[in-house]
Amino acid sequence: MGLWKKVAENRTVRTGAFQGSWEGPFDVSINEPGKTQRFSRSMNTDEMETFNERLKSWGNKVRSALPVSISSHGIGGKQLKRSIRNTYYYEFGEIFRLGFSFAREGIFVHKGVGRGYNMVNGMVVKTSKTSGFNRKPKPWFNPVVESFIPELEQIIKEYTETAIVNSSRIYIR
């Protein structure tokens, strides 16, 4: 196996809690036809810094709204609230991807699965032998992020007209 093939494979492997899982990092990417435009915009550092700060403030707004959503759904414990983090990825000094990470239990709570309840073909199936069906999905993540996406699109549109916002990976499926 060649060096570049190994490097390419290592980039696609997910690490941490999501290793071996089809769930991934929950992020929004800002795609453009080429890197030339991003590079030329990076020469104007004042405008680029303003853009980066606006994206960071957007991420902080969403991050502060998520614990409120967790509390409103009656999800107990503080571990999930404390684990929510913003992630930013830079290219030529400009943020081109931003996302959120949190404890893995957040996915289970959002879907309504866990011990004795599994996800099969997109449906929750009870596998325990106890009576009753007690688990219900508590969608604490998707509605909050969905409500803030138009504001993100507006920020990106004001900065560049050619960018495409790819928000398909931000939602828990």
Image: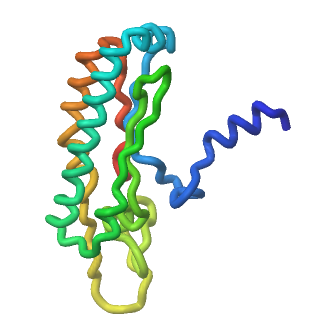
In the image, residue 135 lies at what x, y percent? 29, 76
Q: Is residue 167 above or below residue 107?
A: above
Q: Which one is nearer the viewer's eye here, 29 or 85?
A: 85
Toward the bottom, the furthest residue is: 130
Q: Is residue 29 visible?
A: yes
Q: Quadrant of the N terminus?
A: top right
- How many numbered marks appear? 0
- Identify the residue at horizontal 39%, vertical 57% (top origin): 102
Q: Is residue 83 above or below residue 14?
A: below
Corner quadrant of residue 38 = top left
In the image, residue 145 lies at what x, y percent? 25, 45
Corner quadrant of residue 170 = top left
- Identify the residue at horizontal 25%, vertical 31% (top origin): 152
Q: Which one is nearer the viewer's eye here, 3 or 119?
A: 3
In the image, residue 106 lies at what x, y percent? 35, 63
- Colouring method of the image: rainbow
Toward the left, the furthest residue is: 72
Q: Is residue 169 visible?
A: no
Q: Is residue 158 above or below residue 112?
A: above
On the rendered structure, is 59 left or right of 8?
A: left
- Identify the residue at horizontal 81%, vertical 33% (top origin): 3
Q: Which one is nearer the viewer's eye here, 97 or 85?
A: 85
On the rendered structure, is 69 left or right of 52?
A: left
In the image, residue 87 lies at what x, y percent? 41, 43
- Identify the residue at horizontal 20%, vertical 31% (top origin): 150
Q: Is residue 54 above or below residue 106?
A: above
On the rendered structure, is 9 left or right of 116?
A: right
